């Protein structure tokens, strides 16, 4: 990765949050909450988290307005400043002058009478079209390993096809040498299916919780506790790149005791900041997954193993050994934190086959600290700025989320910087 970009994020992200806070709080409809939770510091385990997350929340003024939220607040502010938004306008390519400076874009009006539009931009063009997660040719070329654990789950990751990345490459820009993605262990398949490209599964928000996880041989294979994709790194080495989550009737109380951070947290933070999705909503999701044949429910572990198509004898032995370690208060196999090592001994028992929920690609076009894409010599392409998942240099291989909101914060910090630079013509 480019450490100068990491340093730039660290130097300017505070100013970005202050700026954004002023915008969303301007009309009394939203308030910025600051995450204070960093997990159980008395029993930190192997990974230390940092309280970098910030969360816009509704005030009483719009508490009952389901149509109002963070995005609506930002769009309203942009309109107040005179910005024009053109919906249903597909980006095609950039245009340049004789010197190679980008001077505008060609776009397609997908609902209008004119098939193509030329948009001139004398101060600069900022591309922020997302990564390439829905471009299967690019995915196979750039990070085939993530395709092996990927479960296509409706509503996950939008519809990015790499259009901005390709446009920059056509102008001579280079791309990160290594593929990278933000993958969450929050997708599931049915008991007769495996993770992998082409499998249509479901969103499984509960998957991040560090309950007992077994491979398809019924064996435990790693410490279940860690940042989002650590489980998936271990899963790559398991049969069919698929594993199972197992929990019991006490799962809500145990999930609260896990003291998770970030978007997987299911209970409010100690400082009162709201969590992303409440436990009650997740329980409703689980019930729906049971109805649809994904999550399996049983009164005994033997029955659950059969429903999940796991070897019964090995699965029961792994489960009993895990409970014995929980009773002793020490994970002698993989050393999970004590406060996340709890017996699964109260029926009914639940289980599901799990793999990767694919949020976004994170490798992109090489940029400098002024957000310009760079050619093979490291020289900037003038008049063009890249932000979000069009840009690279910040993540290598994966998304080690020990800093809550890092991917979103990087995008917003660099987006603000690109906007300021383009507007003032400083670089």
Image (tube, helix red, strand yellow):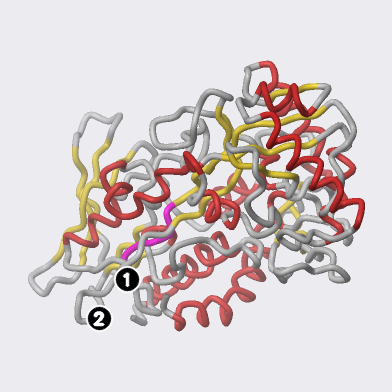
> Can the viewer see residue 275 in this picture?
yes
Residue at left offset 87%, top offset 28%: 347
Q: Which residue occupies the extreme top position in the image?
A: 291
Which residues, given as a range, are shown in magenta?
361-365
Kindly identify which residue carries mark 2. Answer: 378
Principal SS element in the magenta part?
Answer: loop
Mark 1 is surrounded, within 10 Å at the Cα level, by few (under 14), some (14 to 19) or many (20 or more) other residues, namely many
Decide: is 104 above or below 155: below
Please check the rendered image and state whether residue 363 is part of the magenta-colored stretch, yes or no: yes
Which quarter shows the C terminus? bottom left
Q: Going by the picture, which residue comes out furthest to the front?
A: 313
**Would you name the residue on which mark 1 appears?**
366
Q: Is residue 345 magenta?
A: no
Q: Residue placed at 78% from the left, 34% from the top?
A: 64
> Does residue 231 sit above or below 19 in this rendering?
above
Q: Quadrant of residue 67?
A: top right
Any mark on residue 320, and which?
Answer: none
Left/right placement of residue 309 relative to residue 248 reads left
Do residues under tags 1 and 2 come within 8 Å of each other at their CB atoms?
yes
Residue 17, quarter of picture:
bottom right
Q: Is residue 205 above or below residue 173?
A: above
């Amino acid at each position: 990765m480019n450490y100068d970009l990491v340093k730039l994020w660290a130097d300017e992200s505070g100013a970005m949050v202050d700026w954004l806070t002023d915008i969303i709080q301007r009309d009394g409809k939203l308030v910025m909450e600051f995450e204070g939770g960093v997990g159980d510091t008395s029993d930190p385990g192997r990974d230390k988290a940092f309280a970098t997350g910030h969360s816009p929340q509704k005030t009483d003024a719009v508490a009952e307005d389901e149509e109002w939220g963070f995005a609506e607040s930002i769009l309203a502010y942009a309109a107040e400043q005179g910005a024009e938004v053109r919906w249903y306008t597909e980006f095609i390519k950039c245009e340049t002058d004789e010197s190679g400076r980008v001077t505008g874009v060609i776009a397609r009006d997908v609902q209008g009478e004119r098939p193509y539009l030329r948009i001139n931009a004398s101060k600069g063009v900022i591309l922020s079209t997302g990564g390439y997660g829905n471009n299967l040719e690019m995915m196979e070329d750039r990070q085939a390993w993530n395709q092996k654990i990927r479960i296509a789950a409706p509503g996950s990751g939008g519809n990015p096809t790499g259009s901005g990345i390709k446009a920059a490459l056509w102008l001579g820009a280079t791309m990160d040498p290594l593929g990278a993605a933000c993958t969450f262990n929050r997708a599931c398949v049915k008991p007769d299916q495996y993770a992998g490209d082409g499998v249509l599964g479901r969103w499984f928000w509960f998957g991040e919780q560090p309950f007992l996880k077994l491979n398809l041989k019924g064996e435990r294979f790693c410490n279940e506790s860690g940042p989002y994709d650590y489980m998936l790194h271990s899963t790559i080495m398991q049969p069919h790149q698929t594993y199972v989550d197992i929990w019991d009737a006490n799962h809500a109380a145990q999930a609260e005791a896990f003291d998770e951070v970030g978007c997987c947290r299911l209970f409010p933070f100690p400082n009162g900041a709201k969590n992303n999705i409440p436990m009650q909503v997740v329980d409703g999701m689980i019930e729906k997954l049971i109805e649809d044949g994904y999550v399996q429910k049983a009164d005994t572990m033997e029955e659950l193993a059969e429903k999940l198509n796991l070897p019964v004898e090995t699965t029961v032995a792994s489960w009993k050994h895990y409970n014995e370690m929980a009773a002793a208060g020490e994970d002698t196999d993989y050393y999970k934190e004590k406060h996340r090592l709890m017996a699964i001994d109260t029926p009914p028992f639940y289980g599901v086959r799990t793999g990767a929920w694919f949020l976004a690609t994170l490798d992109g076009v090489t940029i400098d600290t002024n957000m310009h894409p760079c050619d093979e010599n490291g020289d900037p392409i003038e008049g063009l700025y890249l932000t979000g998942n069009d840009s690279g240099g910040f993540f290598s291989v994966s998304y080690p989320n020990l800093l809550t909101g890092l991917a979103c914060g990087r995008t917003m910090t660099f987006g603000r910087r690109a906007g300021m630079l383009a507007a003032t013509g400083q670089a």
